[in-house]
Amino acid sequence: MLVMNMMFIFIMMFLMGNMIFISKYKHLLIVLLSLEFLVLSIFFFLCFFLSYFEYNFYFLMVFLVFSVCEGALGLSILVSMIRTYGSDYFQSFNLLY
């Protein structure tokens, strides 16, 4: 019963992150936050899955390294976009320059 409750929580976290990612596409900051929420839900799922089957947690460290690199890259794009265009709206800049 505990396994089914945990799977329900992981699926709901993942679906909520996807709904936010799809519905709030106008601001880059909200998109980045929803991506980090998706990464966090996948991390919790992997942690539960690996501990349930009693595997090693080395893959989680690799996953965290890549997720931190993804977050740093997203923040650098956000800072560059705000310095160049003045906001994080996707509609405020033109790609045809």
Image (cartoon, grey):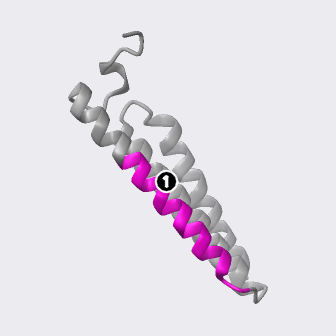
The answer to whether residue 66 is magenta is yes
**Residue at the spot 76% in from the left edge and 89% down from the top edge:** 54
Viewport quadrant of the C terminus: top left
Q: Residue at x 50, y 42 (%)?
A: 21
Q: Position of residue 11 (x, y in %)?
A: 65, 61
Describe the element under mark 1 as helix, strand or loop: helix
Residue at 46 percent across and 50 percent down: it is 34
Please give the range of residues in magenta.
Answer: 56-75
Residue that lies at the very extreme toward the right in this rendered image: 53
Q: In the image, 12: left or right of 27?
A: right
Q: Amino acid at mark 1?
A: Glu
- Say above or below: 48 vs 97: below
Q: Where 38 falls versus 31 (above or below)?
A: below
Farthest residue to the top: give it: 96
Instruction: Say which residue label 1 marks.
Output: 70
**Image position, residue 12 (x, y; %):** 60, 59
**Residue at 48% across, 35% down:** 23
Magenta stretch prevailing secondary structure:
helix
Q: How many marks?
A: 1
The image quarter in which residue 43 lies: bottom right
Image quarter in which the N terminus is found:
bottom right
Residue 78 at x, y = what percent?
Answer: 33, 41
